[in-house]
Image (spheres, rainbow, N blue to C red):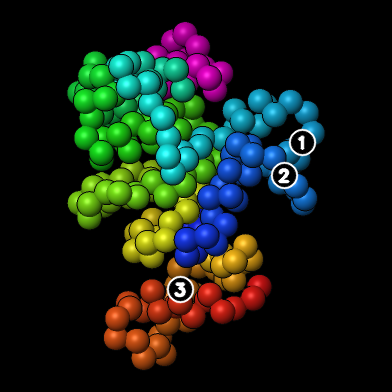
Amino acid sequence: MGVTGLLGPNGAGKSTLMKLLATATGLQSGEVRFGERRLGEGPVNEIRRLIGYLPQRFELMEWSTVHRNVSYAAWAHGLAGAALDAAVDAVLASVDLADRAGSRARSLSGGMRQRLGLACALVHRPAVAVLDEPTVGLDPVQRGELRRLITDPGEHSVVLISTHLVEDLAATAEQVVVLHEGRMRFRGSVAELRALGQNSTSVHASVLEAGYEASLGMTV
């Protein structure tokens, strides 16, 4: 349980790793395990039902309602009947979109679209939530609202968030992994990453940002 942040500069391999974990692309080498389940053993749909995935660029059914978009996502992950209806109502309330349930998705603002995408990823209460740069393109107020929503699933799921915005992780994550050039450079707590920046002489970075910059040259 809890939230782990995946940090790294553009091109570090964050989105590729997220796609692998979400089974959106195939493994060329290595392995991925979800508990005792190994990806590639048994039907992939069984593992996909354990995962909630919000890609960096996601598609909505623009002319369908907010409720219909989330209902479809719930059905695709195996929910039906009264359980589906209850899950949709609950997740729309949690992302503050209950009052827009009957609105068409195409009418939503950017921040609302991100919240709808998050609702679609979380409606089935996945064991693992994979969120690829969920705050990209949002203004500071919208990012703050979305960060608040992201922390709640960590109480019952493993949540992995990728970002290149260090401040996103300061507000949401307990653990941090830093990728650079396809390799892991750091793995530890937010406090440990901050400690790396304590002795930085940079006047342009926060202590946490300085720790992130220092971690890019490390090996694990």
Amino acid found under the numbered disc labelled 3: Tyr
Query: Which residue shows up at 46% across the image and 38% down it?
Result: 54
- Which structural element holds mark 3? helix
**Disc 3 designates what residue?**
212
Q: Are marks 1 and 2 in contact (CB under 8 Å)?
A: yes
**Mark 1 neighbour class, 10 Å CA radius: few under 14, some 14 to 19, many 20 or more:** some
Confirm whether the magenta stretch covers residue 3.
no
Q: Kindly identify which numbered label has been placed on residue 40.
A: 1
SS at mark 1 in the image: loop
What is the spatial separation of the Cα atoms under label 1 and label 2, in whole angstroms?
9 Å
Question: Amino acid type of disc 1?
Answer: Gly
Q: Quadrant of residue 185?
A: bottom right
- Mark seen at residue 27: 2
129 with respect to 66 (left or right): right
- Circle 2/circle 3 CB separation < 8 Å: no
Q: Residue at x 61, y 30 (%)?
A: 48
When the figure is inspected, residue 104 is found, relative to residue 196, above or below; the finding is above
Q: Nearer the viewer, residue 28 or 152?
A: 28
